[in-house]
Image (cartoon, grey):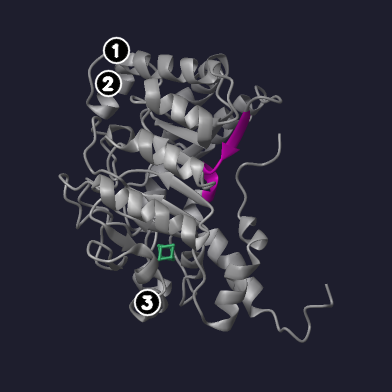
Amino acid sequence: MKAVYSNLKFLRFKEQLDALENGHMASPVHIRIKPINACNHDCWYCAYHVDDLQLGKLMEMKDVIPRDKMMEIIDDLADMGVKAVTFSGGGEPTIYPHLEESINRLGEKGIKVASLTNGSGLKGAVAEAFARYGTWVRISIDGWDSESYAKLRNVKLGEFDRVIQNMRDFASLKSDCVLGISYIVDQKNYKHVFDFVSLMKDVGVNHVKIMGVIVSNDGLESNQYHDGIREEVREQIDRAKLLEDDTLKIVDHYHEMAERFDKEYTTCPSQQFLIVIGADSKVYSCQDKAYTNEGLLGSIENKRFKEFWFSEENYNRIKSINPSVDCIHHCVEHQKNLLLHEYLAADEKHVEFV
Ligand code: SF4
């Protein structure tokens, strides 16, 4: 199986790299759309609801992208040559009443489609649409059994079993859509990584990404939360890796997390590749600044996305974000930004000396 995760994917998109080098805008490659802010789970660490984290300060639970706006956005993305869309939260994407139609429209227009989800709605017509057009679906999980899952998410007993059954049913569709898991490690579940991966192998998922819960904007504080469990998690992941084969991969992002807070660079090139459209019909710089004033690029409520994206307003706003000052918090794009800056800093008179 080839690698699903890589920080070097941007190297395949020359138009965007040239735009960065020459100081103009190209279409983004990938857009995360948060279609709805309502959620049917209530995870204790949800970055959009926890007061200690910067995410979600502008988030209104009632917000949802109207159907016509969603179809307009999808048509614009196709016109612009955007390659991929991931539905994510905010809220739970599978609650969005127009999700099936949106997946089908994206697929028919040749745009790759994926989703982050809690898995509760991965069934019926939505599951079939993902099986037909989806490149991947990734389910976030933290509990390792029905009881722990109910406690960590404030849901009823039995919800864990329903989600596991949805996953089994989806895996049995035998489509090309990759079924992944994000296992969010915290101080309650860290001893269960191996057992959980064993269960996922039995369910038939394709990969399990191990991630750490973020408990603070402050890197030191968030990392201290994990200090006492980091080594045990490593041992658990090492054991889980023994379960890998051609159908199941384990991806350790847990042990990269500590480096994703402090930044020395003063521009954020990853916005040329990936940005976020929120349920409030506003455009944000990235998933780590969604629903914040600091990450707000502008509104498309009364404007087409295509018009907004190529506007001077957007260009100037993107350039004005200074990660060394504005992004002293967790940033999932940090490694990619480091590599992009290294790429852009190379003297063109010397690049032939590879
Ligand atoms: S540096 Fe990270 S957090 Fe800041 S705008 Fe860029 S992607 Fe977002």
Q: Quadrant of the C terminus?
A: bottom right
Q: Is residue 63 left or right of residue 24?
A: left
Instruction: Name the residue type under label 3.
Output: Ser
Mark 3 near ligand 1 (CB under 8 Å)?
A: no
Distance (Cα) linking label 3 and label 1: 49 Å
Tag in front: 2 or 3: 3
Q: Residue at x 33, y 60 (%)?
A: 289
Q: Are marks 1 and 2 in contact (CB under 8 Å)?
A: yes
Disc 3 marks which residue?
311
Secondary structure under tag 3 reads loop
Q: Which mark is residue 236?
A: none
Looking at the image, which is closer to me, 83 or 147?
83
- Where 115 falls versus 109 (above or below)? above
Looking at the image, tell me whether mark 2 or mark 3 is earlier in sequence order.
Answer: 2
Whether residue 158 can be seen here: yes
Tell me residue 251's x, y (percent): 59, 38
Instruction: Name the residue type under label 2.
Output: Ala
Disc 1 marks which residue?
158
Looking at the image, which is closer to me, 296 or 251?
296
Q: Which residues are magenta?
A: 249-256
Disc 2 marks which residue?
150
Q: Is residue 251 magenta?
A: yes
